[in-house]
Image: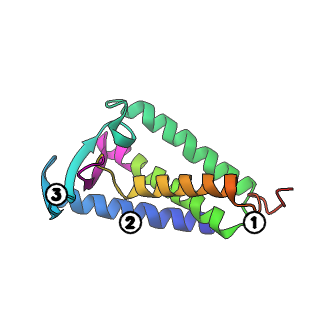
Amino acid sequence: MDIMLYAILISILDQASKHAVKLSLNPYDSIPLIKGVFNITYVQNTGAAFSILRGKTHFFTVVTLIVITVIIYTTIKFTPKNKWVRVLIAFILGGAVGNLLDRLRYGYVVDFLDFIVFPVFNVADMAIVTGALLLAYFIAFDQNLADFYGKSRR
């Protein structure tokens, strides 16, 4: 199933990038790449996106496990026919798995992509947000997109 393959690749990319940051920096150290615009900054995030609900690692672990289970069950039972829908679901699943692995291993998520005017995030966060936003867009606005099961929307 291509969803699982893509999800695994996204998780590997996420984990490899986080591992490189953990080896190279101490927590809250920063390396400017584009002065005043973009840094690599090692942050230990015990919350969710944008560090909301900081310290609720167990809560987010349970929620993430539920989301992953629902995605896997749904995509096995009702495999989406549209290739792009499958890719976007894989982005969400791969990102969720990447952040879950951090929470289980460290008790926090490793964030490091630091656009100065935006909260620090990671590859998994990018995959989740990109997958979710594009999937929502396609479902809401793309009249040519068949539904998840390959049937017409009409």
Residue 41 on image: x %, y %: 20, 53
Q: Say which residue label 3 marks.
A: 36
Please state which of residues 128 and 117 is positioned toward the viewer in this rendering: 117
**Disc on the earlier residue, 1 or 3:** 3
Q: Amino acid at mark 2?
A: Leu
**SS at mark 2 in the image:** helix
The answer to whether the residues at label 1 and label 2 have Cβ atoms under 8 Å apart is: no
Q: Is residue 110 inside the magenta stretch?
A: yes
Q: Say which residue label 2 marks.
A: 13
Numbered mark located on residue 110 in the image: none
Q: CA distance from mark 1 to mark 2?
A: 32 Å
Is the residue marked by circle 3 packed among few (<14), some (14-19), or many (20+) residues within 10 Å? few
Q: Amino acid at mark 3?
A: Gly
* 66 on left or right of 138: left
**Disc on the earlier residue, 2 or 3:** 2
Q: Residue furthest right?
A: 154
Is the residue marked by circle 2 packed among few (<14), some (14-19), or many (20+) residues within 10 Å? some
Please state which of residues 90 and 76 is positioned toward the viewer in this rendering: 90
Identify the image quadrant of residue 10: bottom left
* 135 on left or right of 115: right
**SS at mark 1 in the image:** loop
Q: Say which residue label 1 marks.
A: 144
Identify the image quadrant of residue 84: bottom right
**Disc on the earlier residue, 1 or 2:** 2
**What residue is rendered at 39% in x and 39% in y?**
48
| Magenta stretch in the rendered image | 101-118
**What residue is rendered at 46% in x and 58% in y?**
127
Which circle, 2 or 3, is nearer the viewer?
3
Identify the image quadrant of residue 135: bottom right
